[in-house]
């Protein structure tokens, strides 16, 4: 949705005038929330309307907006709105650009409800025990990859149509309870009702957990989309548009900072000798290898929904399967601290630029 909404979302969006009324702000924000839309990432002019009067009575406001819902942002994550100078008009025209995005497929995300499925542990065990002869870190991530495929298949067979199964189970439960009304002395009907009720509650609980986690993932995804920069000015002041050009401009900038070597002076030993040093006994404690119990304690202190890295596994997977996966996990951690080397799989990560300001107009505008 594009246009002049003639109202602001925050008091900071109007300057050189009396502050907007709080009721108008609350009403407009409530309307946006009910519609399920939010501002598209913008650049250019932050204030999009002015009354073009003398300086004494001049008013600036952000009346023009570009709005999109979650479905749009998920399909076109690199959408960008550039608010241009107003020219002869009192409103700033907006140019919305939808940049092509590279589709990487659905990302694997571990759902905690999987651990309650009767086939979960046998499935993980079957995948985990496949032999690998390479280093401990490679072995850990190769087995995680095997488990990921099996869990995705289990989800497809047992959880992908859970809403339909809940509806069917509820109908069968109601039908059974109506039959009990007609035959209150049938033990078979009572046993059937008990089984149906147990299945119905289990399915509803699983659905609730799935929806809770999916909502959590969706909110994270939505926040990431809000941080996507579709267009910026590079270090030379030139406009760069499109995900590839924006990414390359950031890479070039940081290469200019980190890609050069400078001559340095050697450390003067007298400063080390004059400064407090770690005692030999304390140094040995710091350098000793981590024990398996310490690694396990660190993992189990992480919240069940946290630590969702680039591989998609949460800490709940490791907690629920620790007896099987724990030894390999500990060996991989100990191997890293022993030799200081990380495989490519272990070193993969997700890097995001987090703006320090709520809006990006002044930081990255054209």
Image (cartoon, helix red, strand yellow):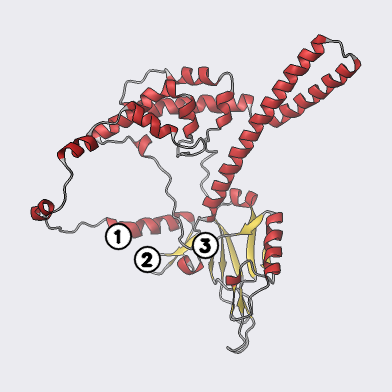
- Position above or below: 142 against 84: above
Within-10-Å neighbours for mark 1: few <14, some 14–19, many 20+: few
Q: Are marks 1 and 2 in contact (CB under 8 Å)?
A: yes
Determine if residue 163 is in view.
yes
Q: CA distance from mark 3 to mark 2?
A: 22 Å
Query: Which residue is label 3 attached to?
Result: 358
Q: Nearer the viewer, mark 3 or mark 2?
A: 3
Instruction: Tell me which corner region of the image, top left, top right, bottom left or bottom right, holds residue 49.
Output: bottom right
- Position above or below: 150 against 39: above
Q: Earlier in the sequence, mark 1 or mark 2?
A: 2
Taking depth in this image into account, of 323 and 64 the one nearest to the observer is 323
Query: Which residue is label 2 attached to?
Result: 235
Within-10-Å neighbours for mark 3: few <14, some 14–19, many 20+: few
Taking depth in this image into account, of 47 and 316 the one nearest to the observer is 316
Determine if residue 161 is in view.
no
Q: Are marks 3 and 2 in contact (CB under 8 Å)?
A: no
């Amino acid at each position: 949705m594009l246009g002049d909404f003639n109202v602001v979302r925050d008091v900071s969006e109007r300057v050189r005038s009396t502050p907007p009324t709080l009721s108008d702000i609350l009403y407009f924000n409530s309307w946006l929330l009910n519609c399920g839309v939010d501002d598209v990432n913008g650049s250019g002019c932050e204030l999009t309307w002015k009354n073009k009067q003398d300086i004494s009575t001049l008013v600036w406001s952000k009346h023009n907006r570009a709005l999109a819902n979650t479905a749009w942002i998920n399909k076109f994550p690199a959408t960008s709105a550039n608010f241009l100078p107003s020219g002869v008009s009192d409103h700033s025209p907006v140019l919305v650009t939808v940049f092509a995005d590279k589709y990487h497929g659905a990302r694997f995300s571990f759902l905690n409800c999987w651990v309650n499925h009767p086939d979960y542990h046998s499935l993980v065990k079957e995948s985990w025990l496949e032999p690998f002869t390479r280093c401990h870190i490679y072995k850990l991530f190769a087995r995680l990859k095997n488990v990921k495929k099996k869990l995705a298949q289990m989800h497809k067979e047992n959880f992908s149509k859970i809403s339909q199964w809940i509806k069917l189970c509820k109908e069968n439960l109601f039908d059974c309870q109506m039959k009990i009304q007609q035959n209150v002395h049938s033990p078979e009907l009572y046993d059937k009702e008990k089984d149906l009720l147990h299945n119905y509650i289990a399915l509803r609980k699983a659905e609730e957990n799935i929806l809770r986690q999916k909502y959590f993932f969706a909110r994270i995804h939505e926040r990431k989309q809000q941080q996507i920069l579709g267009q910026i000015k590079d270090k030379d002041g030139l406009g760069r548009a499109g995900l590839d050009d924006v990414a390359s401009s950031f890479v070039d900038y940081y290469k200019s900072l980190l890609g050069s070597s400078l001559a340095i002076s050697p450390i003067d030993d007298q400063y080390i000798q004059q400064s407090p040093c770690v005692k030999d006994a304390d140094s040995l404690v710091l350098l000793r290898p981590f024990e398996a119990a310490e690694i396990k304690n660190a993992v189990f202190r992480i919240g069940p929904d946290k630590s969702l890295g680039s591989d998609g596994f949460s800490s709940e997977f490791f907690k629920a399967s620790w007896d099987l996966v724990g030894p390999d996990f500990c060996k991989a951690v100990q191997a890293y601290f022993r030799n200081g080397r990380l495989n490519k799989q272990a070193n993969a990560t997700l890097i995001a630029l987090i703006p320090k300001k709520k809006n990006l107009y002044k930081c990255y505008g054209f």
